[in-house]
Amino acid sequence: MYPSRIWAGHYLNKGTTEMAIKDTATAFFEACETGKGSEVCQQWCQPNATFSCQADALADTKTLAAYADWMKGLLTPVPDGRYKLTSFAEDGARGTVVASAEFHGTQTGEGGPVPPTGKSVVSDYAYVMQFDGDKITHMTKIWNDVHALRGLGWA
């Protein structure tokens, strides 16, 4: 009647409930998107959590810790960087949570690839967070980096 990992609404991977992975994903997403970096974000991740993104800007980023630090660094040249959450869904049977959002920001700070441009961007993206138990083990970011970098005047 129920898939082997689902019973009465509970995710049965190491005793984790669906609500627990959703709560973990929410906490990670908010911390990562507000530039808390790996030091804070690591509490919601497996120690060697991996990262992937089919975007040139993140081609060399292979760990979730490195990605969290990249996001922290982005908020230096784009100090007003913020997200607008557009969707948040969990798939307990697969131990996955997906968040989609828009990143809004203007490059007014130093530290970018070029001096401050004063240009703004709204960039759509999604996180696909995979869990092992109650911690994120892998995250895929779906993002059009060319659109975002062009909007900021970086490409």
Image (spheres, rainbow, N blue to C red):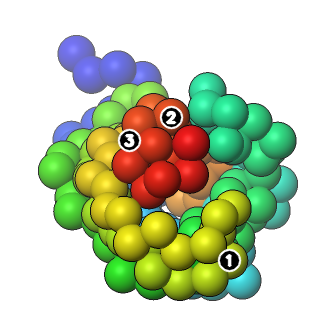
Marks 3 and 1, how far apart at CA: 25 Å
Q: Earlier in the sequence, mark 1 or mark 2?
A: 1
Q: Which of 50 and 58 is in front in this view?
A: 58
Q: Which of the two discs, 3 and 1, sits closer to the camera?
A: 1
Quadrant of the image containing the C terminus: top right
Packing grade of label 2 (10 A; few <14, some 14-19, many >=20) is: some
Precedes in sequence: disc 2 or disc 3:
3
Is 41 above or below relative to 25? below
| Quarter of the view holding residue 38 | bottom right
Mark pair 2, 3: CA separation? 15 Å
Q: Count the numbered circles shown.
A: 3
- Residue receiving disc 2: 146
Three-letter amino acid code of the residue under disc 2: Val
Mark 3 or mark 1: whose residue is earlier in sequence: 1
x and y percentages locating residue 39 in the rendered image? 72, 83
73 relative to 28 in the view: left or right: right
Q: Which residue is drawn at 32% across and 56% down?
A: 121
Secondary structure found at label 2: helix
Query: Callout 1: helix, strand or loop?
Result: loop
Q: Which amino acid does label 3 sit on?
A: Ala
- Position of 73 compared to 104: left or right? right
Residue 63, horizontal then vertical, whole percent: 78, 51
Give the SS element for disc 3. Answer: strand
Q: Mark 1 points at which residue?
A: 111
What residue is drawn where x is 47% and y is 68%?
A: 117
Disc 3: which residue: 126
User: What distance separates the C-alpha of mark 1 from that of mark 2?
Assistant: 19 Å
Can residue 70 be spotted in the picture?
yes
Q: Which residue shows up at 61% across the image and 27% down it?
A: 54
**Residue 96 visible in rendering:** no
